[in-house]
């Protein structure tokens, strides 16, 4: 397939572009000196080409990006003042592209929706690729509608629903770990696994993102997108290949089987928000008092849901997905807890803890926790750990995402069906929360969550 000739970033002056897209692009271009890519920034803010070039240069310098591909992109960077909801403006932007264009919507969902409407009113160049950020829609119905509108513009294989977790090297490692070793795969099922946790606890607070976060909350911000993608990779059956069509199909199938545990959307979830506290010597105000937050919206900053995969392989195994902000212990991992041994031979002393396989997302490593004979009294059990460091990937997550996009390989992006299922699962739980069926609890910033939530792990 022909590579992308021009990357158009709609929302070029936004936070996502400078914080994530440009640094990711810089890393990619450094790794691929032969690539020739034009970069067009488009936004409403009145900037000129020179100012945009400076922004691009600064972001590239920030990640130490160098080489001929970097220089080419900087030298050919362009900026067009653009109202993304105007067909005329978008036509003008697309007319100035060379080669196959990729249009990246680094915009809030409502503006993205208007921009797609505008693209419907004009003729877009053949082969145009569209890349959309999360959140993809705001619920199942809007995601389905968005899918219809996008595929009416371009084919499904040219729609990239971006999820940067799919570009994390350790998330990618799940495929290699599961499908190239005989050791784990035969054990990953209800006969041997007691529980799976996918946890992404962050020390970060709101980071000036109230405008977005206060309407999203932890459930939508992290679980609806990233953590369900991880769950799909852990539960899916072995695909025939890791090419986009098969991988997307295997993941969609996996997500189709997911529902709140025991079908109970009320019991399946817990939610909380942080009160004032301190993390690593830094004082944080309570979430409700953060600038730009509407406390009456009752947005949760910590969400935990227990799901199940209703398949022969997984039925009955709880999958606990959890993520929160302003937490003291930044636990970020997939923890697979195996069942207890059926019988402890008489004479071995101690209570054997279950075997746990931890796939850690930062630092990127895998740890297998086992019971072994003690180093002291050989008949008293001890805990042993087998650790493998994964090392950082060659690119950062956005670099990987852009690599797939610019090579027109959708393997690392979310398929349309999967995107709808992620909302279906979350919509049920969110409805119970909005109806007040699940209390909004509290935890001090810097703690591990509400006191009575048994922090396993
Ligand atoms: C983003 C969320 O998608 O992922 C943020 O919007 C979150 O709230 C971030 O902090 C976590 O991912 P990473 O890769 O930055 O740790």
Image (cartoon, grey):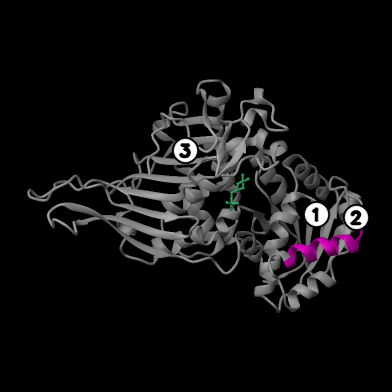
- Residue 448's tag is 3
- Where is residue 212? Give x, y as percent: 70, 39
Which residue occupies the extreme front position in the image? 281
In front of the other: 14 or 85: 14
Question: Residue 14, can we see it?
Answer: yes
Q: Is disc 3 surrounded by few (<14), some (14 to 19) or many (20+) residues within 10 Å?
A: many
In magenta, the rendered stretch is 47-61
- Where is residue 241? Give x, y as percent: 48, 65
Quick one: label 1 or label 3, which is nearer the N terminus? Answer: 1
**Residue at the image position 75 percent from the left and 73 percent from the top:** 70
Mark 3 close to ligand 1, CB under 8 Å:
no
Quick one: label 1 or label 2, which is nearer the N terminus? Answer: 1
Nearer the camera: disc 1 or disc 3: 3
Tell whether label 2 touches label 1 (CB within 8 Å): yes
Query: Magenta stretch: residue 59 in it?
Result: yes
Tell whether label 3 touches label 2 (CB within 8 Å): no
From the image, tell me which residue sits under label 2. Answer: 47
Instruction: Using the rendered view, name the quadrant where residue 367 is placed.
Output: bottom left
- Residue 12's tag is 1
Instruction: Using the rendered view, name the quadrant where residue 325 is placed.
Output: top right
Give the CA separation, mark 1 to mark 3: 37 Å
């Amino acid at each position: 397939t022909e590579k992308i000739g021009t990357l158009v970033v709609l929302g070029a002056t936004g936070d996502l572009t400078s914080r994530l897209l440009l640094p990711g692009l810089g890393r990619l271009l450094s790794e691929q000196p032969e690539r020739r890519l034009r970069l067009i920034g488009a936004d409403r803010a009145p900037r000129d080409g020179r100012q945009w070039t400076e922004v691009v240069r600064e972001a590239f310098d920030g990640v130490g990006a160098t080489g001929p591909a970097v220089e080419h992109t900087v030298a050919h960077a362009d900026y067009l003042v653009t109202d993304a909801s105007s067909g005329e403006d978008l036509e003008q932007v697309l007319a100035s592209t060379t080669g196959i264009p990729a249009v990246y919507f680094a915009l809030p969902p409502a503006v993205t929706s208007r921009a797609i409407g505008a693209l419907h009113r004009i003729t877009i160049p053949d082969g145009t690729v569209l890349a959309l950020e999360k959140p993809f829609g705001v619920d199942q119905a809007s995601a389905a509608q968005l899918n219809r509108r996008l595929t009416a513009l371009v084919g499904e294989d040219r729609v990239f629903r971006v999820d940067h977790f799919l570009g994390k090297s350790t998330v990618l490692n799940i495929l290699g770990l599961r499908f190239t070793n005989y050791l784990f795969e035969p054990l990953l099922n209800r006969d041997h696994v007691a529980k799976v946790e996918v946890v992404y606890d962050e020390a970060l607070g709101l980071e000036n993102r109230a405008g977005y976060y206060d309407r999203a909350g932890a459930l939508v911000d992290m679980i609806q997108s990233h953590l369900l993608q991880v769950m799909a990779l852990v539960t899916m059956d072995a695909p025939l290949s890791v090419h986009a069509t098969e991988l997307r199909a295997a993941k969609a199938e996996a997500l189709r089987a997911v529902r709140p545990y025991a079908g109970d959307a009320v019991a399946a979830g817990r939610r909380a928000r942080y009160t004032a506290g301190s993390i690593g010597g830094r004082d944080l105000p309570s979430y409700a008092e953060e600038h730009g937050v509407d406390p009456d919206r009752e947005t949760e900053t910590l969400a935990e849901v227990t799901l199940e995969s209703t398949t022969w392989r997984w039925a009955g195994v709880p999958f606990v997905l959890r993520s929160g902000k302003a937490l003291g212990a930044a636990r970020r991992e997939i923890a697979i807890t195996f069942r207890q041994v059926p019988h402890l031979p008489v004479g071995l002393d101690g209570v054997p803890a279950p075997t746990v396989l931890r796939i850690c997302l930062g630092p990127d490593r895998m740890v297998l926790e086992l019971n072994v004979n003690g180093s002291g009294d050989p008949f008293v059990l001890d805990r042993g750990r087998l650790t493998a460091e994964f090392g950082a990937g060659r690119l950062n997550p956005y670099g990987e995402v852009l690599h797939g996009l610019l090579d027109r390989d959708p393997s690392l992006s979310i398929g349309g069906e999967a995107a709808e299922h992620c909302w279906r699962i979350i919509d049920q739980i969110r409805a119970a929360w909005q109806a007040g069926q699940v209390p909004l609890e509290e935890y001090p910033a810097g703690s591990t969550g509400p006191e009575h939530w048994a922090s396993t792990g």
